[in-house]
Image (tube, rainbow, N blue to C red):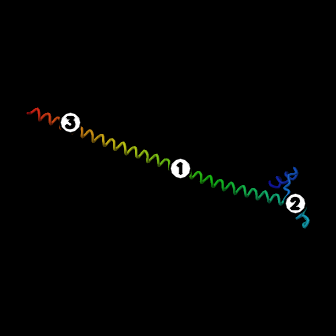
Amino acid sequence: MLYADVLREFEQGKIIENLWEKSLVLSKDSSRSSNDIYFELRIKSLERELENDRKKLKEQENKNIVNVNESEENVYIEALKKLEETSGKIKKVKAEKNMTSTKIIFSASIFLLLVLAISIISLY
């Protein structure tokens, strides 16, 4: 696959200048042609690029996982805050209910005392 890509680049005249110059120098001390050496160098450079891209992609995936974990944590924190808020409201309603019960009992006691006082006064 990479070889076909390099061949297509080469045929279209898209040559990496520094790799071509290196292949010319290396071919002088070798029985191999500068084209062969260029293809080898270009394939190796593409392999390095692919490996770097894979590493960057892996790093980005790891960052995304961290971001997802942080997002989930924020959701849990918000849920806990709402739970605490609701719990506080429930406690407040219960306290108000108890206060209302106490007021009713107190009012009933006052009423009974008044009725008793009126009954005693009417006896005299």
Tag of residue 21: 2
Q: Position of residue 100 (x, y in %)?
A: 30, 40
Q: Name the quarter where the C terminus is drawn.
A: top left
Q: Residues within 10 Å of mark 2 (few under 14, many from 20)?
A: few
Q: Residues within 10 Å of mark 3 (few under 14, many from 20)?
A: few
Tag of residue 74: 1
Q: Tell me the kind of residue under disc 1.
A: Asn
For residue 85, side relative to residue 94 (left or right): right
Residue at x-position 39% and y-position 44%? 90
Please identify the quarter of the rendering in which residue 59 is found. Answer: bottom right
Residue at x-position 14% and y-position 34%? 118
For residue 64, side relative to residue 20 (left or right): left
Could you tell me how far apart the alpha carbons at marks 2 and 3 are, in whole angstroms? Answer: 110 Å
Helix, strand or loop under label 3: helix
Could you tell me how far apart the alpha carbons at marks 3 and 1 are, in whole angstroms? Answer: 55 Å
Tag of residue 111: 3
Helix, strand or loop under label 1: helix
Instruction: Please tell me whether residue 1 is drawn above or below residue 120 in the rendered image.
Output: below
Instruction: Please tell me whether residue 50 is drawn above or below residue 88 in the rendered image.
Output: below
For residue 117, side relative to residue 47 (left or right): left
Could you tell me how far apart the alpha carbons at marks 1 and 2 are, in whole angstroms? Answer: 55 Å
Nearer-N-terminus badge (1/2) = 2
Nearer-N-terminus badge (2/3) = 2
Mark 3, mark 1: which one is toward the viewer?
3
Q: Position of residue 79 (x, y in %)?
A: 49, 47
Nearer-N-terminus badge (3/1) = 1
Residue at x-position 58% and y-position 51%? 68
Helix, strand or loop under label 2: helix
Q: Position of residue 26 (x, y in %)?
A: 88, 64
